[in-house]
Image (spheres, rainbow, N blue to C red):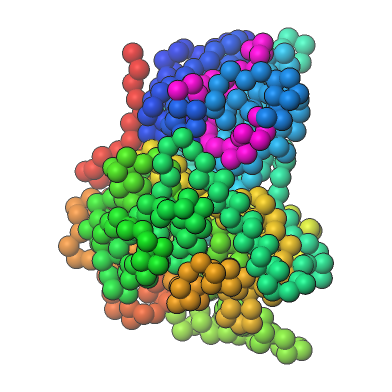
Amino acid sequence: MCGIAGVIDLAGQRTVSPNIIRAMAQAIIHRGPDEDGFYEAPGISFANRRLSIVGLSDGKQPIFNEDRSIATVFNGEFFDYQSIKARLESKGHKFSTHCDTELIPHLYEDHQEGMLDHLQGQFGIAVWDARQRRVILARDQFGICPLYYAKVQYDGSEWLLFGSEIKAILASGMIRAEPDRLGINHLFTFFGVPGPQSCFKGISALEPGHFLDIRLGSQSHASRIEDKTYWRMDFPQRGQERTGPSLKSLVDDFDREMLASVEKRLRADVPVVSYLSGGVDSSLVVAMASKIRGTPIPSFTIRIKSPKLDETPEATIVAKHIGTTPIIIDVGSDEVLNTYPALIRAAEAPVVDTSCSALLLLAKEVHKHGYKVALTGEGSDEWLAGYPWHKVHRIASWVDSVPGLKVSNWMRRFFLWVTKAPRYNQAMQNRAINAMSGPNGWLDIYNLFSMAKFRLFSPEMMDLVKNVSPYEDLNLPSERMKSWHPLNRELYVSGRAHLSGLLLNAKGDRVAMNSSVETRYPFLDVNVFNFLATVHPKWKFRGLFGDKYLLRHLSDRYLPSSIAWRKKAMFRAPFDSFHLDNVPPFIDHLLSEESLKKTGYFDVKQVLRWRKEFKKLPSWGLSRVSIEMGLVGVLATQMWHHTFIDHSLADMDYWQAPKIS
């Protein structure tokens, strides 16, 4: 993958100083250390930082069509490059490179924005059509590749800035870094920031499966920007799902789709490796990749320095079964603490999931060994109900089957009473349920984390967010969702909120590309998703506890049964690393009364209180986990504010825009 950035004068007349676009490119050099490329035309400035993976010698961007009327910069990979190229050449298109980027201008010539229907892979795209004075910005179907934009007033004109990372937009100097408190509210709801909201005022994330259609203005007409959808996750109407003809036939079909997906993601002009956690998802990817290659794929594994969280024994079983020898990196409390400032700089948002720091270190190790591409197993839990809250919700739904009794509501109230959690607003709860077209397992886990708002937000923050429903900001297709099976509604939220907000962001692209490593996701192939979407939920989640049922039957063909049928283990690093007595000084600085008052996000007395009192709670209790996660969120938000907004909160490094002379 690469990094892209650009500045567009919406009046279509002016170009910015070359130093501005070069500073934007320099801010994301980690995304593409191999070479850079720039394009300028009246009203347009594009930049690219390239991580060369396909077409190593002749893929410098921007890339054009035959008469150079269409220019493009591109971040990502098109896995069907060769077959699409052959089809275009048969229609008379002339290719001048061996790089997949060149598909874009030729497909655009034939289909304009309809080109997006022909592209499968992971991508962030910018296309300039000089004849129509039109720019297309597009993002892949699941949001694997990030793309941000901002509309600003600068030097008497209206401009649109875009970049693969927010750092590129800030480096322009055309917009000031200011916090968006509603974005922080999203973080304290969804564990991440799914978009379009970001934590920076005026900067938006382009949603997965969307494109911006930008028409530059002229003396006769004003500019126009439209956010359009070209693809959206969809499921059959309830009762129309595929049930057979047999479990074996479904597993056979799933096998074919997954093998095809893994094979496509092994295509590269550089070596490809794989992450291996010991869970069924990454283990299956490693096994399939090794089968396709005919030799074991190199693998990388994290060993958490806590017996309760360590999965290397299971990873070792898989490695021996396949014949690979994984490179193991050890991660404990010290590594988590020392890595967090770099993690926040990479993620450009507060990060609550401490395991993201372990993945940042894993990507660093991949880069250290000279690799650029790694396969990983994200997406399986999203499409096959792999999370424990799906089980909790199914049990709650089962007890609610008694006519006239909503037993689950009493269960939830009892849980809140036992954990001494603050009372939540039932009207806001109802708005969330309506946005998701009915009760949803994700709402229970999000409510658990959202308790941190009531405990720790300042009165000013609570006043701002008390009547705002983050669920309504997700733009869920609520009417369409009403026709789906309830489990498929949960899976949609998995993909829309958890996948794009956390797994592909702070846990995916950002931590990997921080070390110039491209991660590829076989479970996030459109064909794999489309197949699984049609399968009846009973084959995804069996009974009360049978998560990923179809996947486990498939994995039985490739892995030891102890791995194929192993219970889901949540990959995480220790939460309490930040709350021990012996912590680095910057943590106490960030959580000091002075720093907390400067940011204004949190209630000073409550933060100081819970930093002491959480230790009295049972280590196994959900109330302690909820409070620990909330305190990590407070620290991460303070660290993010120091890194990007106000550098006076602590004695620690912060991000600075590159200076180009």
Q: Quadrant of the C terminus?
A: top left
Q: Position of residue 36 (x, y in %)?
A: 43, 22
Q: Is residue 351 above or below residue 409?
A: above
Q: Residue furthest front?
A: 294
Residue shown at 54% from the left, 13% from the top: 40
Q: Position of residue 320 (x, y in %)?
A: 36, 66
Q: Is residue 61 above or below residue 334?
A: above
Q: Position of residue 641 (x, y in %)?
A: 37, 44
Residue shown at 40% from the left, 59% from the top: 276
Q: Quadrant of residue 66?
A: top right
Q: Is residue 71 magenta?
A: yes
Residue shown at 74% from the left, 62% from the top: 534
**Span colored in magenta:** 57-85
- Is residue 372 visible in the rendered image? The answer is yes
Residue shown at 72% from the left, 13% from the top: 131
Instruction: From the viewer's side, name the closer residue of 556 and 432.
Output: 556
Query: On the rendered structure, is 546 left or right of 455?
Result: right
